[in-house]
Amino acid sequence: MSQYQEFVEFHNPPKQSKNAQIEIPQEISSETPEEILQKAYQSIHSDLASEILDRIKSNSPAFFESLVVDLMVAMGYGGSRSDAGQSIGQSGDEGIDGIIKEDRLGLDVIYLQAKRWEGTVGRPEVQKFVGALHGKRARKGVFITTGKFSEEALDYVKSIDPKVILIDGKSLANYMIDFNLGTSKNVTYEIKRIDSDYFTEE
């Protein structure tokens, strides 16, 4: 067996001097367990968001419109799911895909635009939506896309009336995770710490 280098090294490990120090990887020595766990959580969250977006894009535009309503209801808009669902895709106006109640009483409404796009939504598309809102004398609108918005589009909605919220694909996936839409809990970990008050003697 002495002819095998691996066998020789196993039975005769190299000797280290007394002053030799074991090098510890920097990331292990500098990060706390909580920081490592946080990084792992962020990585899992990012992977899940990407998978959600891929699933949305693989489904039909009708599915995406229904998903938009589900999300708005999950976030507290639209009253019941049946009430909210009656308005989506029925307006027939250019630039408007649906109308949803802002609250359960329907004191105000929010106009929706749902675009299942792969690329970038530019200012012209957002302007069409805003024009449709003006035609309805609407004060609030939400434009949701699976793609992303250009800088010009983002800057445009900052200084206009009505109020328009732009939700891109990344934000959409994160909202779905936050409001448990299309996702379910897998494992829950509790991080506990010492309760100093309990150990304080009077």
Image: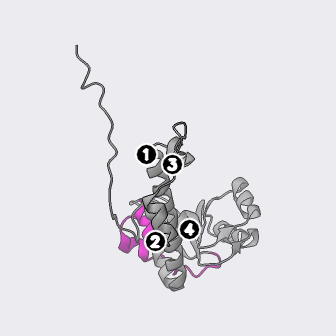
Q: Quadrant of the N terminus?
A: bottom left
Q: Secondary structure at mark 4?
A: strand
Q: Which residues are magenta?
A: 69-95
Which residue is the site of mark 4? 111
- The answer to if 90 sits in the magenta stretch is yes
Q: Is residue 197 above or below residue 100?
A: above
Q: Label 4 vs label 3: CA separation?
A: 74 Å
N-terminal label among 4 and 2:
2
N-terminal label among 1 and 3:
3
Label 3 near label 4: C-beta < 8 Å? no
Q: Residue at x 32, y 48 (%)?
A: 190
Q: Label 4 vs label 2: CA separation?
A: 11 Å
Amino acid residing under circle 2: Val
Label 2 near label 3: C-beta < 8 Å? no
Around disc 2, counting alpha carbons within 10 Å, would you say few (fewer than 14), some (14 to 19), or many (20 or more)? Answer: many
Q: Label 3 vs label 2: CA separation?
A: 68 Å
Which residue is the site of mark 3? 15
Amino acid residing under circle 4: Tyr
**Nearer to me, 194 or 3:** 3
Q: Is residue 97 above or below residue 157?
A: below
Q: Secondary structure at mark 2?
A: helix
Q: Quadrant of residue 132?
A: bottom right
Closer to the eye: label 2 or 1: 1
Closer to the eye: label 4 or 1: 1
Q: Residue at x 43, y 45 (%)?
A: 34
Which residue is the site of mark 1? 33
Q: Position of residue 154 (x, y in %)?
A: 70, 60
